[in-house]
Image (tube, rainbow, N blue to C red):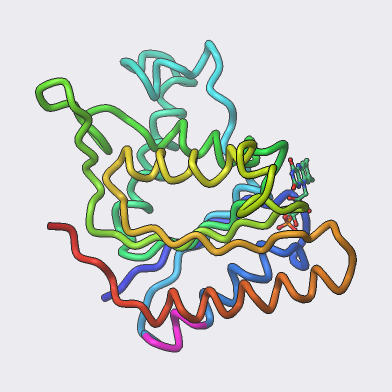
């Protein structure tokens, strides 16, 4: 049975660019695999809390208090969802040149030494290999070419975080120039939908 984990992180409602495109990706993935099981994790509606002094040890140390155990349970739950998935779709709008803090908080709960990555002879070894990820990037401006390429802290960051846990089969779908007016927005959505079709038609690259 195939499992698809669907993560949204837009703070905007259902018509947000990334949410529309995430839904499009899910529809297309189900078209190729109608029996796939879908798990939704909406970080925009229900964000994981920031790690704070009362909870940090639950995720990055040894839990001892109720709050730390609660943080550990959430971390376990988020990791279990990710581990169970063979395909992950992530809606990741660009916020202040990077990702929404809700998505960052999700990574803070999911990147756990000994659970999703470990060090072997001083080198990091990701423990979640063999998954494919489609990241939907919605952006007000243009970052895939031109002078703003250097201030794209969204795509390289996501590529690094996913690679850190061993996920290297990542397709980035870019919906750019959303802030350039209605025509640019429509063109960006159409282009992104074509990118999604191409991604869904591409077979999973099995880890060596
Ligand atoms: C808090 C916030 C910060 C943003 N920062 C950027 C930015 O740094 N660069 C950019 O090109 N667009 C930025 N935008 C525009 C969004 O990337 C764009 O509206 C995108 O469509 C949002 O995705 P969504 O429609 O799925 O919510 C920002 C939007 C918000 C709400």
Identify the residue at image location x=49%, y=19%. 55
Q: Nearer the viewer, residue 165 or 41?
A: 165
Q: Position of residue 170 (x, y in %)?
A: 39, 58
| Left or right position of 151 against 69 | right
Q: Position of residue 115 (x, y in %)?
A: 24, 35
Q: Position of residue 19 (x, y in %)?
A: 66, 64
Total numbered labels placed on residues in the image: 0
Identify the residue at image location x=50%, y=62%. 6
The quarter of the image holding the N terminus is bottom left
Q: Is residue 19 above or below residue 157?
A: below
Residue 29 quadrant: bottom left
Q: Which residues make up the magenta segment?
A: 28-32
Q: Is residue 37 above or below residue 52?
A: below
| Name of the residue lying farthest toward the front | 146
Q: Magenta region's main secondary structure?
A: helix
Q: Is residue 110 above or below residue 70?
A: below
| Name of the residue lying farthest toward the right | 181
The quarter of the image holding the C terminus is bottom left
| Left or right position of 18 against 181 | left
Identify the residue at image location x=32%, y=59%. 169
Q: Nearer the viewer, residue 188 or 49?
A: 188
| Name of the residue lying farthest toward the top | 53
| Left or right position of 104 against 189 | left
Q: Nearer the viewer, residue 29 or 42?
A: 29
* Magenta-drawn stretch contains 95: no
Q: Position of residue 158 (x, y in %)?
A: 48, 44
Identify the residue at image location x=36%, y=13%. 64
């Amino acid at each position: 049975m195939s499992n698809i984990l669907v993560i949204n992180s837009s703070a905007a409602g259902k018509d947000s660019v990334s949410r529309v495109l995430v839904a499009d990706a899910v529809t297309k993935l189900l078209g190729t695999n109608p029996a796939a099981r879908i798990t939704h994790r909406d970080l925009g509606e229900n964000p994981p809390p920031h790690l704070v002094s009362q909870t940090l040890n639950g995720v990055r140390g040894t839990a001892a208090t109720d709050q730390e155990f609660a943080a550990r349970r959430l971390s376990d739950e988020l990791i279990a969802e990710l581990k169970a998935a063979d395909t992950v779709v992530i809606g990741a709008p660009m916020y202040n040149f990077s990702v929404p803090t809700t998505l960052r908080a999700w990574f803070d709960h999911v990147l756990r030494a000994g659970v999703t990555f470990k060090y072997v002879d001083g080198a990091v070894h990701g423990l979640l290999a063999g998954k494919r990820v489609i990241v939907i990037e919605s952006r007000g401006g243009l970052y895939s070419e031109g002078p703003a390429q250097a201030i794209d802290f969204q795509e390289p960051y996501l590529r690094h975080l996913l690679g850190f846990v061993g996920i290297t089969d990542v397709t980035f779908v870019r919906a750019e120039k959303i802030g350039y007016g209605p025509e640019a927005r429509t063109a960006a959505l159409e282009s992104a939908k074509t990118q999604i079709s191409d991604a869904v038609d591409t077979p999973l690259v099995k880890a060596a």
